[in-house]
Amino acid sequence: MAVAIKNAELYHLTRDQKEELSTLLRDQRVETSRSRSILEAIADGVLVTDQHGEITLFNHSAERMLELKRAEVIGRSIEHFSGLFGGIALAWMNTINSWIQDHGSFHPMNTFSEQVSLDNGNVLSVNLAPVINNNEFFGTVSVFRDITHLIEVDRLKSEFVATVSHELRTPMTSIKGYVDILLMGVAGELSDQQLRFLRVVQENTERLTILVNDLLDLSRIEAGQVILSMGSIDLSDLIEEVMEEIDRLTVAENKSMQFELDLPPDLPLIKGDAERIRQILINLLGNAFHYTPSNGNVSLSARQTGEEIQVDIKDNGVGIPPKEQERIFDRFYRGENHMVIATAGTGLGLSIVAKLINMHNGRIWVQSSGIEGEGSIFSFTLPLFTTARKAIKVR
Amino acid sequence: MPKRILIAEDEQDILKLIIFTLQFGGYEVIPTSNGEEALAMTRKEYPDLVLLDVRMPRMSGYEVCSQIKADLEIQHIPIVFLSAKGQEAEIKTGFDKGAIDYILKPFAPDHLLNRLEEILANLEAEKEI
């Protein structure tokens, strides 16, 4: 009797457990299929591989974007998939392969991004990440989006700015040229008042020229069209050349200023685009000169700090109030000080400088109490030029 | 004898400005207002220097430059671009076509004269060596 009861209890117990387990399994299946449905329905293309590089998921959007049927890819290896593209997505495929072959070759937060141009002219932006659960590598997931339209819009914007700049330069050539000729006195004597008025025209033409050039420059930098031609640069030589230009500025504006250079003789070479670094230096020194009253002091010093060179440009001019400091690198922002307002400018200079320094992997910052006469210090860093490249791991 | 400079420029106001500037600088000027005319006149007149706009009707400045540099008779004539096209790639194209200099518009007349004088003096010095 007691045994029969025990058996009955046991029977109930196993039945309950079995039911519980099957509910769990069913729930899991529903959950899995729901996740799958979501991945299938997503507007971005999704490609999932398992830990061996076999493709396990290839959604509708992926079919549409890559013009492939899932039957052609599901269950096949990533090498097979790569072969269908004839090598155009090489970096993407190589990254998947290296992760599969060596699970230690990535960090869990590692991601990879690439733009892939397809044969049909479309451009995809690909983002790849490893799938990791409890430190175990489960495979990879790639998400891609068609950015053909975005790229086209960007191209049209750059083209528009380039065309407008060119169209503006043509009439400006006549205005500047004829005014310069009149001021040279070669077209006849001018009265003092005529000279004064013409100088106003000349200064404003100059200002317009700078604005057009800066706008074009900024739009090209933002569109990623400015490619730095990197080389080794002797900063001391470059600064010497830049100072000649600044000297010309002081003569042209008839404003005297004390310039001081502090450059250690053993300053190592830096890595950068000489033309662009010249542009950065002229801009910062020009600002220091313009925003410091006559007979002020501007100093430039450079020194090595670790793997970088830091350049400090210090003046004892009007300074920048703390509330303005965070905005001075914004496009078109100009300070409210009377000296800033009185100086012709576009508010684009520092914005361009910051972007160029950023492209060199450097940093720029400003220190100023904002008190007139205490001036400001603009500092920026540039990487050192190293001949011996760091060894790249080859797998 | 004054040096002779051929100009190709389709904007009449700018053409007159360059003519005035160069004549003031003591040069003899051969003005043309499109690419084809510039090429034909270079072949006929053998100027000491050719000053080319880039964007012109009936043959661009780049094309004129290429054709001059491909013609044994006139390929020695130095070519300077004077253009509003100021992007690195455009300037590079100018030099790739064989130009000796690329000056940007808007230009300062005295600056233009200095550059041309410098170029012609350098070539003169090279010839003597």
Image: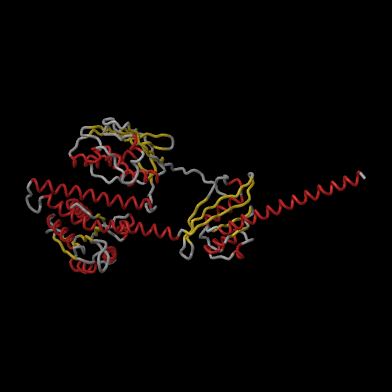
Name the spot of residue A391 as percent of width and height, x first: 51, 44
In the foreground, A382 or A126? A126
In this orientation, which residue lies closer to the viewer: A60 or A264? A60
What residue sits 82% from the left and 48% below the top?
Answer: A12
User: Which residue appears at 63% of the width and 44% of the height?
Assistant: A135
A200 in relation to A302, above or below: below
- The image's colouring method is secondary structure
Residue B7 horizontal/vertical position (percent): 19, 62
Where is residue B20, by image quadrant? bottom left
Q: Position of residue B79 (x, y in %)?
A: 24, 60
Dividing the image into 4 quarters, which one contains the N terminus of chain A?
top right
Q: Nearer the viewer, residue A178 or A348?
A: A348
Q: Residue at x 34, y 37 (%)?
A: A325
Q: How many marks?
A: 0
Q: Is residue A188 left or right of residue A126?
A: left
Q: Is residue A295 above or below residue A83?
A: above
The residue drawn where x is 15% and y is 47% is A199
Res A185 visible: yes
Above or below — where is A24 with respect to A310? below
Q: Position of residue A324 (x, y in %)?
A: 33, 38
In this orientation, does residue A278 appear?
A: no
Is residue A132 left or right of A363 when viewed as pictured?
Answer: right
Q: Nearer the viewer, residue A259 or A13?
A: A13
